[in-house]
Image (cartoon, rainbow, N blue to C red):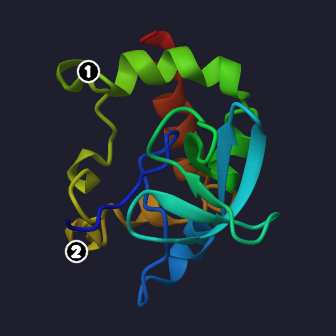
Amino acid sequence: MGVFDVFCLACGGPCYARPGFNSTNWCNDWIVVTDRGAVNCAGYDGYGGFRNSDRVGDIVDAFKPDSSVNDIGGFGFHKVCWQIIGFPFYRQLIHIHREVFNNHAERHKYLLSFAFAQDYNFDKFTRENMWMLQNPLKNRRNFTRILREWKAIVNNR
Protein backbone atom coordinates (compact mmCIF):
# COMPACT_ATOMS: atom_id res chain seq x y z
CA MET A 1 0.00 0.00 0.00
CA GLY A 2 1.42 3.40 -0.98
CA VAL A 3 1.51 6.68 0.83
CA PHE A 4 -0.80 9.60 0.08
CA ASP A 5 -1.09 13.21 1.08
CA VAL A 6 -3.92 15.03 2.81
CA PHE A 7 -4.83 18.48 1.57
CA CYS A 8 -6.17 21.45 3.51
CA LEU A 9 -9.97 21.53 3.26
CA ALA A 10 -9.94 25.33 2.89
CA CYS A 11 -7.12 25.97 0.41
CA GLY A 12 -6.25 22.59 -1.15
CA GLY A 13 -2.62 23.03 -0.11
CA PRO A 14 -0.13 20.42 1.16
CA CYS A 15 0.05 18.97 4.66
CA TYR A 16 3.79 19.58 4.99
CA ALA A 17 6.55 21.94 3.93
CA ARG A 18 8.95 20.81 1.25
CA PRO A 19 12.69 21.40 1.55
CA GLY A 20 13.74 24.05 -0.93
CA PHE A 21 10.32 25.73 -0.80
CA ASN A 22 10.99 28.16 2.06
CA SER A 23 7.60 29.79 1.63
CA THR A 24 5.83 26.56 2.67
CA ASN A 25 6.99 26.30 6.30
CA TRP A 26 3.55 27.49 7.46
CA CYS A 27 2.07 24.31 5.91
CA ASN A 28 3.49 22.19 8.76
CA ASP A 29 1.08 23.71 11.30
CA TRP A 30 -2.17 21.72 11.17
CA ILE A 31 -5.39 21.46 13.08
CA VAL A 32 -7.88 18.63 12.68
CA VAL A 33 -11.44 19.59 13.60
CA THR A 34 -13.10 16.51 15.11
CA ASP A 35 -16.41 15.67 16.73
CA ARG A 36 -14.44 15.87 20.00
CA GLY A 37 -13.04 19.36 19.32
CA ALA A 38 -10.07 20.85 17.49
CA VAL A 39 -6.78 18.95 17.80
CA ASN A 40 -3.37 20.56 17.30
CA CYS A 41 -1.28 18.33 15.07
CA ALA A 42 2.34 17.80 14.17
CA GLY A 43 4.18 15.35 11.96
CA TYR A 44 2.26 13.84 9.05
CA ASP A 45 2.62 10.04 8.78
CA GLY A 46 2.02 9.65 5.02
CA TYR A 47 -1.24 7.74 5.50
CA GLY A 48 -3.73 10.44 6.52
CA GLY A 49 -2.64 10.64 10.16
CA PHE A 50 -1.01 13.34 12.25
CA ARG A 51 0.54 13.08 15.69
CA ASN A 52 -1.64 14.77 18.30
CA SER A 53 0.45 17.63 19.73
CA ASP A 54 -1.63 17.68 22.90
CA ARG A 55 -1.67 13.94 23.77
CA VAL A 56 1.45 11.91 23.16
CA GLY A 57 0.74 8.65 21.34
CA ASP A 58 -2.57 9.72 19.79
CA ILE A 59 -2.88 9.75 16.01
CA VAL A 60 -5.50 12.02 14.46
CA ASP A 61 -6.86 10.94 11.07
CA ALA A 62 -7.50 13.90 8.74
CA PHE A 63 -8.74 11.58 6.00
CA LYS A 64 -11.83 10.13 7.62
CA PRO A 65 -14.64 12.45 8.71
CA ASP A 66 -15.52 11.02 12.11
CA SER A 67 -14.16 9.38 15.24
CA SER A 68 -14.56 5.82 16.42
CA VAL A 69 -13.75 4.30 19.80
CA ASN A 70 -10.05 3.92 19.01
CA ASP A 71 -9.48 6.52 16.31
CA ILE A 72 -9.91 10.27 16.22
CA GLY A 73 -11.02 11.52 12.82
CA GLY A 74 -12.02 14.86 11.39
CA PHE A 75 -11.29 17.57 8.86
CA GLY A 76 -7.77 18.85 8.32
CA PHE A 77 -6.78 22.48 7.86
CA HIS A 78 -3.64 24.52 8.00
CA LYS A 79 -4.00 26.47 11.24
CA VAL A 80 -3.69 29.69 9.26
CA CYS A 81 -6.47 28.68 6.84
CA TRP A 82 -8.75 27.62 9.70
CA GLN A 83 -8.23 31.08 11.19
CA ILE A 84 -8.94 32.84 7.87
CA ILE A 85 -12.26 31.03 7.36
CA GLY A 86 -13.44 31.78 10.90
CA PHE A 87 -12.56 28.67 12.95
CA PRO A 88 -15.55 26.51 11.90
CA PHE A 89 -16.64 23.75 14.28
CA TYR A 90 -17.18 20.11 13.32
CA ARG A 91 -20.98 20.47 13.12
CA GLN A 92 -20.46 23.28 10.58
CA LEU A 93 -18.20 21.07 8.44
CA ILE A 94 -19.79 17.64 8.39
CA HIS A 95 -22.50 18.51 5.86
CA ILE A 96 -20.12 20.45 3.63
CA HIS A 97 -17.68 17.55 3.61
CA ARG A 98 -20.28 14.97 2.63
CA GLU A 99 -21.48 16.94 -0.38
CA VAL A 100 -18.16 18.30 -1.55
CA PHE A 101 -15.82 15.37 -1.04
CA ASN A 102 -17.64 12.02 -0.81
CA ASN A 103 -19.05 12.05 -4.33
CA HIS A 104 -16.11 12.21 -6.73
CA ALA A 105 -18.33 13.41 -9.59
CA GLU A 106 -19.28 16.49 -7.57
CA ARG A 107 -15.89 17.17 -5.99
CA HIS A 108 -15.14 20.86 -5.62
CA LYS A 109 -12.41 22.04 -7.99
CA TYR A 110 -9.74 23.96 -6.13
CA LEU A 111 -7.55 26.45 -7.91
CA LEU A 112 -4.76 24.04 -6.94
CA SER A 113 -6.55 21.07 -8.53
CA PHE A 114 -3.32 19.73 -10.04
CA ALA A 115 -2.17 19.02 -6.49
CA PHE A 116 -4.76 16.31 -5.95
CA ALA A 117 -2.74 13.20 -6.61
CA GLN A 118 -1.14 10.50 -4.54
CA ASP A 119 1.61 12.90 -3.47
CA TYR A 120 1.42 16.68 -3.52
CA ASN A 121 3.01 17.79 -6.77
CA PHE A 122 5.22 20.73 -5.80
CA ASP A 123 6.98 20.50 -9.18
CA LYS A 124 3.95 21.98 -10.96
CA PHE A 125 4.54 25.36 -9.32
CA THR A 126 6.14 28.06 -11.42
CA ARG A 127 7.22 31.61 -10.76
CA GLU A 128 3.72 32.75 -11.81
CA ASN A 129 1.75 30.65 -9.32
CA MET A 130 4.24 30.27 -6.45
CA TRP A 131 2.25 32.87 -4.48
CA MET A 132 -0.34 30.13 -3.79
CA LEU A 133 2.18 28.39 -1.54
CA GLN A 134 2.99 31.51 0.49
CA ASN A 135 1.60 32.12 3.95
CA PRO A 136 -1.79 33.78 3.37
CA LEU A 137 -1.30 36.00 6.43
CA LYS A 138 1.69 37.50 4.61
CA ASN A 139 0.37 37.31 1.05
CA ARG A 140 -2.92 39.15 0.52
CA ARG A 141 -3.51 37.52 -2.86
CA ASN A 142 -3.42 34.05 -1.30
CA PHE A 143 -5.59 35.22 1.61
CA THR A 144 -8.23 36.42 -0.87
CA ARG A 145 -7.99 33.18 -2.87
CA ILE A 146 -8.62 31.06 0.22
CA LEU A 147 -11.68 33.11 1.20
CA ARG A 148 -13.02 32.79 -2.35
CA GLU A 149 -12.41 29.02 -2.37
CA TRP A 150 -14.10 28.59 1.01
CA LYS A 151 -17.11 30.65 -0.07
CA ALA A 152 -17.48 28.39 -3.13
CA ILE A 153 -17.32 25.29 -0.89
CA VAL A 154 -19.89 26.64 1.56
CA ASN A 155 -22.21 27.78 -1.24
CA ASN A 156 -22.07 24.29 -2.83
CA ARG A 157 -23.83 22.84 0.23
Q: Are marks 1 and 2 in contact (CB under 8 Å)?
A: no
Q: Which sits earlier in the primary sequence, circle 1 or circle 2?
A: 1
Is the residue marked by circle 2 packed among few (<14), some (14-19), or many (20+) residues within 10 Å? Answer: few
- Is 40 located above or below residue 98 in the figure? below
* Amino acid beneath label 2: Asp
Q: Nearer the viewer, mark 1 or mark 2?
A: 1
Q: Quadrant of residue 35?
A: top right
Regarding mark 2 in the picture, which secondary structure is present there? helix
Regarding mark 1 in the picture, which secondary structure is present there? loop
Please give the name of the residue rendered at 22% of the width and 60% of the height, measured from the top-left corner. 118
Please give the name of the residue rendered at 60% of the width and 36% of the height, measured from the top-left corner. 67
- Residue in front for this viewpoint, 149 or 91: 91
Q: Is 96 on the left or on the right of 46, as rendered?
A: right
Q: What is the distance, in whole Å, between disc 1 and disc 2 at their CAs?
A: 28 Å
* Amino acid beneath label 1: Asn
For disc 2, the marked residue is 123
The percent position of residue 45, horizontal first and vertical second, equals: 47, 71
- Residue in front for this viewpoint, 15 or 140: 15
For disc 1, the marked residue is 103
Q: Quadrant of residue 123?
A: bottom left
